[in-house]
Image (cartoon, rainbow, N blue to C red):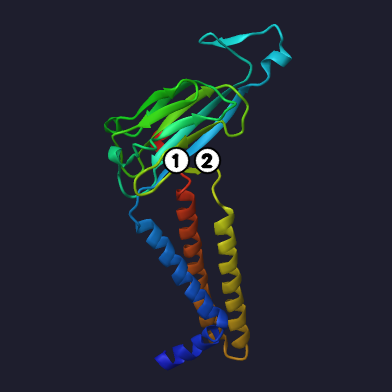
Amino acid sequence: MTLATLTELIAPLTASPWFSLIGWLISVVLSVVFYLKSKKEKRPVFGISTTLLIKNLKSRYAKLRIEMDAVEISSLSVTKIYFWNEGKETIDKTDISTIAPLKIIADPDTKILSCDLLKFSSNSNNVSITPAQEGKEYKISFNYLDPSQGFAMQILHDGESKKPILIIGDIKGHGRPKQIQLNARDDIVPVIVGGFFSTWFGYALISSLARAKSENPSTIIIVSIIAIVFIIVSILVYYALYVFITRTRSIPKDLL
């Protein structure tokens, strides 16, 4: 098969305006994905999971009392916090602002009863949690956090607030750590993107076959193969997006 014959066979597919648009979109998406994956930056993130253990004990069981360190408890919740460096650059102790240090804070209607360090990536991280204001604030410090390194904490507290605990403070070169939703992967985004690509490639395939219907069967087969190749490319783009998006919601395994 000569180059001229191949060009003639491909012409029905490339003649569609969707072909250029799809090619441009693929290049843009891949460029953004690879840029973000290779970008070096500090990216401190944290996720919070709160479980209500006891609710309105006094109103339900008037004669039953639960105390912790001589403090009577009516409502009790446990909050787990996962904090890690999602970036590609190490966060050092000196990167933590001395004016706005990292702290765990409780909302006005919540009192922290205990705060414990559950796990950490390495002993060298030297993570510590110390009380700053009894029942309300705990200061967080560490030696360093390499990429994907972090720590997990467990906090017992009273109250029934939907957002009882937060982490505040500033990291040099980034600012305030970003809170992310745990176990809530943005599946809808890659699904929408994959749907767009599938639609466009399906259109290109049908359009090409329609243009080639008056030609011989071998031409239709070749054009179909070309369209299938582009569909495979779309699936790879879809997968790359899915992996990148879901990766940003993954807690390091050594903290689980």
Q: Name the mark on residue 72.
A: none
4 is higher (above) or lower (below) than 62: below
Left or right, residue 73 beside residue 135: right
- Residue closest to the far top: 63
Residue at 52% across, 40% down: 182
**Callout 2 amino acid:** Leu
Residue at 51% across, 80% down: 20
- Residue closest to the far front: 99
Q: Secondary structure at mark 2?
A: loop
47 is higher (above) or lower (below) than 206: above
Between residues 78 and 227, which one lies in front from this camera angle?
A: 78
User: Residue 172, position in %: x, y?
Assistant: 34, 45
Residue at numbered disc 1: 251
User: How many numbered markers are drawn?
Assistant: 2
Mark 2 surroundings: few (<14), some (14-19) or many (≥20) residues within 10 A:
some
222 is higher (above) or lower (below) than 160: below
Between residues 87 and 224, which one lies in front from this camera angle?
A: 87
Query: In this rendering, does residue 225 appear at all?
Result: no
Q: Are marks 2 and 1 in contact (CB under 8 Å)?
A: yes
Residue at numbered disc 2: 182
Between residues 190 and 38, which one lies in front from this camera angle?
A: 38
**On-image quarter of the C terminus:** top left
Left or right, residue 210 beside residue 9: right
Query: In this rendering, does residue 207 appear at all?
Result: yes
User: Residue 173, position in %: x, y?
Assistant: 35, 49
**Callout 1 amino acid:** Ile
**On-image quarter of the N terminus:** bottom left
Residue at 48% across, 53% down: 245
Of mark 2 and mark 1, the one earlier in the sequence is 2
User: Residue 104, position in %: x, y?
Assistant: 46, 31
Mark 1 surroundings: few (<14), some (14-19) or many (≥20) residues within 10 A:
many
